[in-house]
Amino acid sequence: MTGNQAIQRQASVTGQPHVNRPAVRKFLRRLRYPLHFLDFETFSTAIPLFDGLRPYQQVPFQFSMHTVRSEGAESEHQGFLAEGRNDPREEFMGRLRGVLGGKGSIVAYNAGFEIRRLKEFRHSLRA
C-alpha cells in the first residue's frame, strides 16, 4: 500500500479522521491578514463563444470572496456575476483585482484551478 492508501485504510477501519497537525500548523503560519477566501465559477462550450478561446476552455464568469481583515473579525462578502452576452473575463479580472488589493493571503479550495484560469487570461492578453 502507498502511504496515502494506508492513511485511507486506517481512517476507514477506525472511523477516525486523519489530521496531519504539523502540515496544518505549517500552512496556517504562512497565512497573512487580510485573508481572502475565494471561489470561481466557470463555463465551457464546445464551440467557443468569444474570440481567442479554445473549445471547452473554462471561462470565469462569477466569483465569491469572503475577506477576514484581522484575527477575530467578521467576514465581509464581495462577489461578481457577469451579465449580458459579452466575454466576461476582462470585467471579471478587473473586479477581482479591485477587491483583492495588494495585501494578505488568498485561500481557495481548488487553488490550482483558479491559478490556471488567471494564467490563461494573462496569456490571452499577450496573444
Image: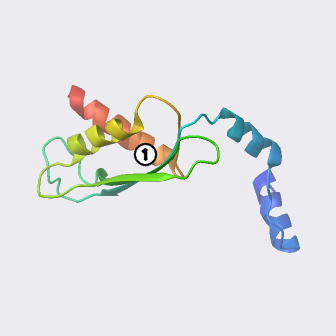
Residue 75 visible (yes or no) = yes
The picture places residue 96, in percent across and down from the top left corner, at 34, 41
Tag 1 residue: 114
The amino acid at mark 1 is Glu
Residue 39 visible (yes or no) = no
Question: For the point 35% across and 53% down, which residue is it?
Answer: 79
Q: Residues within 10 Å of mark 1 (few under 14, many from 20)?
A: some
The picture places residue 121, in percent across and down from the top left corner, at 29, 37
Q: Quadrant of residue 77?
A: bottom left
Most distant residue in the right direction: 14
Question: For the point 26% across and 38% down, which residue is it?
Answer: 94
For the C terminus, which image quadrant?
top left
**Residue 116 appears left or right of 50:** right
Q: Quadrant of residue 5?
A: bottom right
**Residue 3 appears left or right of 90:** right
The picture places residue 119, in percent across and down from the top left corner, at 36, 35
In the rendered view, would you say 35 is above or below 41?
above
For the N terminus, which image quadrant?
bottom right
